[in-house]
Amino acid sequence: MGSITMKFAKLVTPPSRKDESQHDAYSDKDDIEEQSVRNNTSSSAGTREHPEKDPNIVDWDGPDDLENPINWSEKKKIASIRIVSILAFLSLLGSTITSPAGVDIMATFNSTNQTIETLVTSLYLLGYVFGPLVLAPLSELYGRTIVYNVCNFSFLIWSVACALAYNLSALIIFRLLAGLAGSAPMTIAAGTIADMVPLEKRGLAMMGWIMGPVLGPTIGPLGEIQLNAESYTYTILENKTKRLQKEIGNLDLLSALDNGKQPKEFFRVSIVRPVQMLLFSPIVLLLSLYMATMYGYQYLIFTTFPRVFQGQYDFTKSSVGLVYLGIGVGFLVALVFSGMISDQLVKYLTKRNGGIAKPKYRLPLLFAGALLAPIGLLLYGWTVENKVHWIVPIIGSAFLGAASFTVIMPALAYLIDAYTIYAASATAAAIVSCSLLGAPLPLAGNSMYDALGVGWGTSLLGFIAVVFAPVPLVFWKYGERVRNSRFSQVKF
């Protein structure tokens, strides 16, 4: 862990000019132009033809401008990633925190409806369906910080409202609203990391961020908000332009990243972008479906924990909550493994292939996830079915946790590397897919396990995981070709 911490500290070191040229060297020429805008090279390629010749264009004050997020100090970058990590932890904690207490919640409101009990937990995820569609474009219009702050405050309000709900209907509505607000850190964090961290160090930064949902400390979402500085380059330059207009008195000054669109027009275009990416980019669609499948597996398995460990292994209500640590341990092991090799693997493959960095170099970890998923599901299902000692199904759930991490995180990193200029929108598309599958599946979980039993019910999930197993190989072989195909050349 010490070596990983040292490596994480190095992720914020600004890259050399040579490194910058490498980490943006994609085979797709359109991406190269867009990457240079997002990754803040000294020019403003893709915004204007010759912005440096126009004295009214406001750009960075050279390649070492400290306002440029890529040049921020190590302390500032780590603080920003730590904050979004904590916020993501709190958001994901809220998604399952009601699950172990489902029986007590229903007893409080004098109800025995199992569907409603599951809905109390799963409706939170419905907020993750609609939230990203609005929050991602808002962050690309007004910046990351204001969206974080408004959503954090809203999350606090609706979480308190859940605790004070006077009936089940109110609780369900407040859970939905909490999910809407809580989707912000999961939606925007990828864009925040893409703002600050170059490609060849982005995997370790992603690991630092995901530590929050996996291991994050239990502190409130508003504790360090003021340290979370704005990282979106469009907003930074826009604010700089307005400041200079006021100081100099020259209203003709224009941001180098200005796209010429009015806010309403820009928002109208941006709000449909995640859906466009989901429908018209095969890469985004297939990866999102794969992530959604893994996400859905977790929530389906969660629905079995009370019936299995209380009903079969005689766990008390309070001790059932400890069962969830199995998946957490799997996350942790996969996190350490991914952190040790992710960026090193990208650098090795880049060097081996002529110094050209490609998004597909994030995919090898997906092979591990594709293998671990069916193993974990089958181990969990059949050890429960055959009443093997309780530790064995928990080990099976740990395999599933490791599989989920080594599918979802490399897939998100791939999307960020492939669509850096639209990282928030690509992530929003993936989160919407995950939530669309994760929210309704638990509603059907009890019926499926009642009909098939835990063994065959979980085996069905395992068979689906086997079908998805070749997906990483398909992306490795044909992903670049699909990305460069005419079908994928939709201007988002």
Image (cartoon, rainbow, N blue to C red):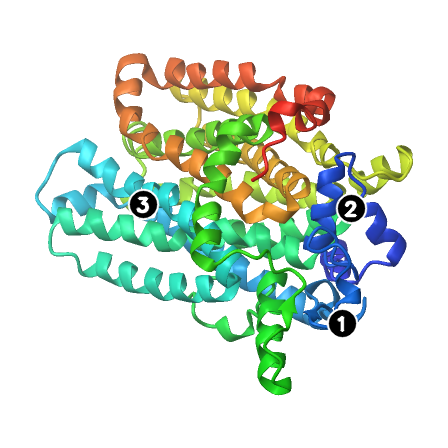
Residue 49, horizontal then vertical, whole percent: 75, 54
Can the viewer see residue 219 in this picture? no
- Nearer the observer, disc 3 or disc 2? 2
Q: Is residue 295 left or right of residue 340?
A: left
- Image disc number at residue 65: 1
Q: Is residue 103 left or right of residue 4?
A: left
Mark 2 surroundings within 10 Å by alpha-carbon count, few (fewer than 14), some (14 through 19), many (20 or more)? many
- Image disc number at residue 124: 3
Against 174, residue 358 (above or below) is above
- Nearer the observer, disc 1 or disc 3? 1
Mark 2 lies on residue: 24
Of callouts 1 and 3, the N-terminal one: 1
Residue 350, horizontal then vertical, whole percent: 85, 38
Q: Quadrant of the C terminus?
A: top right
Alpha carbons under labels 1 and 3: distance apart: 42 Å
Of callouts 2 and 1, the N-terminal one: 2
What residue do we see at 64% from left, 60% from top?
Answer: 257
Circle 1 SS class: loop
Against 245, residue 320 (above or below) is above
Circle 3 SS class: helix
